[in-house]
Image (cartoon, grey):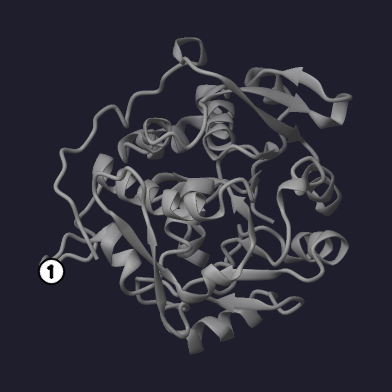
């Protein structure tokens, strides 16, 4: 394990408007259809990146968490398009319903993740993945079995996050693939400190993003990203039934082959809402300097923060984030 010395970046609390960004454009697909059918429809736009043994990385949640992606949506997707794939997870760093494999397996049953194999990747050990160009790490400790898959679908519930500001594909992979004891500690905790959560703001975003880069470097072009913008509490699904109430409108689903573009598009959609609609989520993002996730992904060459947003509900029409939020769906947890 190698940890480098570095000076944190800045600007994680400053939103950069689209017109001030530079670089090439990627493609992000959008549907307002928040259903199993909508998920399957948008999946077809990015499915060709996947091959061989496919890992489906999603947050299966703490027990009875109200905001996770509905398991019947995931079941329909996997049965129709990914019949031989596995859901992948790692144990949590914090004490809770998933910090041991035994408890994690019981929580999976409670939350309905019983229709497909679920691989708790760090149940039997870890593996080190190299990180190219990182300033905090040269490598990251991952769940051992991650190396056994050929391609990866990051199926992400986009929402707020107590440490990251927001949780998109970057958080889903960077925290979600790091093992529960070594990798997650590397991201969250300065070595030798008693405080389990002492790393925050820009430094945390950079460490988490470097962990993500270890995974994206490993799989290369064999990754697809889907972000579900539904039940967007300011809390992560790791807070389960204790998550803050949902006060941000439901939006739809975004998908891309570019991790930065898909997370950036979701953030742009949130910022295109009215102040009443987005106040809590924007405050959570900026107070945690969560926008550093986006700028650091760009610095590391992980994708583009410029994109073409394609509305697949309307004949693959090019739209803007402000067009997406014209008719927002009610904000209430189901």
Quarter of the figure with residue 201: top left
Side (left or right) of 126 relative to 189: right
Residue lying at 87% horizontally and 25% vertically, measured from the top left: 314
In the current view of this chain or complex, which residue is farthest to the top?
Answer: 19
**Residue beneath disc 1:** 194
Quarter of the figure with residue 108: bottom right
Would residue 26 be visible to someone looking at this image? yes
- Per the image, label 1 sits on a secondary structure element best described as loop
- Residue closer to the observer: 188 or 106: 188
- Residue closer to the observer: 107 or 259: 259
In the current view of this chain or complex, which residue is farthest to the bottom?
Answer: 102
Residue lying at 47% horizontally and 15% vertically, measured from the top left: 22
Q: Assess disc 1: are there few (<14), some (14-19) or many (≥20) residues with their C-alpha within 10 Å of its C-alpha.
A: few
Which quadrant is the C terminus positioned in?
A: bottom right
- Residue closer to the observer: 323 or 222: 222
Quarter of the figure with residue 197: bottom left
Residue 263 coordinates in the image, percent (x, y): 54, 37
Side (left or right) of 297 relative to 261: left
Task: Say if 282 sits above or below 14 in the image.
Answer: below
Side (left or right) of 147 relative to 307: left
Side (left or right) of 288 relative to 294: left
Task: Say if 302 sits above or below 217 in the image.
Answer: above
């Amino acid at each position: 394990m190698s940890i480098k010395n570095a000076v944190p970046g800045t600007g994680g609390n400053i939103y950069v408007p689209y017109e001030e960004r530079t670089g090439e454009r990627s493609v992000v697909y959008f549907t307002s259809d928040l259903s199993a059918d909508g998920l399957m429809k948008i999946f077809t736009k990015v499915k060709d990146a996947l091959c061989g043994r496919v890992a489906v990385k999603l947050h299966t949640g703490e027990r009875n968490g109200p905001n996770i992606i509905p398991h019947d949506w995931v079941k329909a997707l996997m049965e129709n398009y990914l019949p031989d794939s596995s859901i992948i997870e790692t144990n949590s760093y914090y004490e809770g319903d998933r910090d041991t494999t035994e408890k994690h397996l019981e929580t999976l049953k409670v939350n309905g993740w019983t229709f497909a194999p679920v691989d708790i990747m760090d149940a039997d050990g870890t593996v080190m993945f190299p990180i190219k160009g990182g300033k905090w790490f040269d490598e990251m400790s991952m769940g051992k079995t991650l190396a056994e898959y050929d391609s990866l679908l990051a199926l992400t519930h986009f929402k707020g996050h107590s440490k990251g500001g927001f949780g998109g594909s970057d958080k889903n992979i960077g925290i979600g693939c790091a093992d529960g004891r070594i990798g997650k500690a590397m991201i969250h905790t300065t070595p030798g400190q008693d405080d389990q959560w002492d790393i925050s703001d820009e430094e945390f975003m950079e460490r988490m993003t470097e962990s993500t880069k270890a995974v994206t470097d490993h799989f290369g072009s064999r990754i697809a990203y889907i972000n579900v913008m539904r039940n967007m509490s300011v809390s992560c699904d790791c807070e389960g039934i204790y998550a803050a109430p949902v006060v941000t409108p439901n939006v739809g689903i975004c998908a891309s082959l570019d991790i930065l573009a898909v997370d950036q598009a979701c953030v742009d959609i949130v910022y295109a809402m009215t102040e009443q609609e987005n106040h809590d989520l924007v405050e959570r993002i900026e107070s945690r300097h969560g926008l550093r996730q986006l700028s650091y992904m760009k610095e590391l060459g992980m994708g583009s923060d410029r994109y073409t947003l394609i509305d697949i509900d309307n004949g693959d029409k090019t739209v803007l984030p402000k067009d997406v939020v014209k008719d927002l769906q009610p904000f209430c947890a189901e």
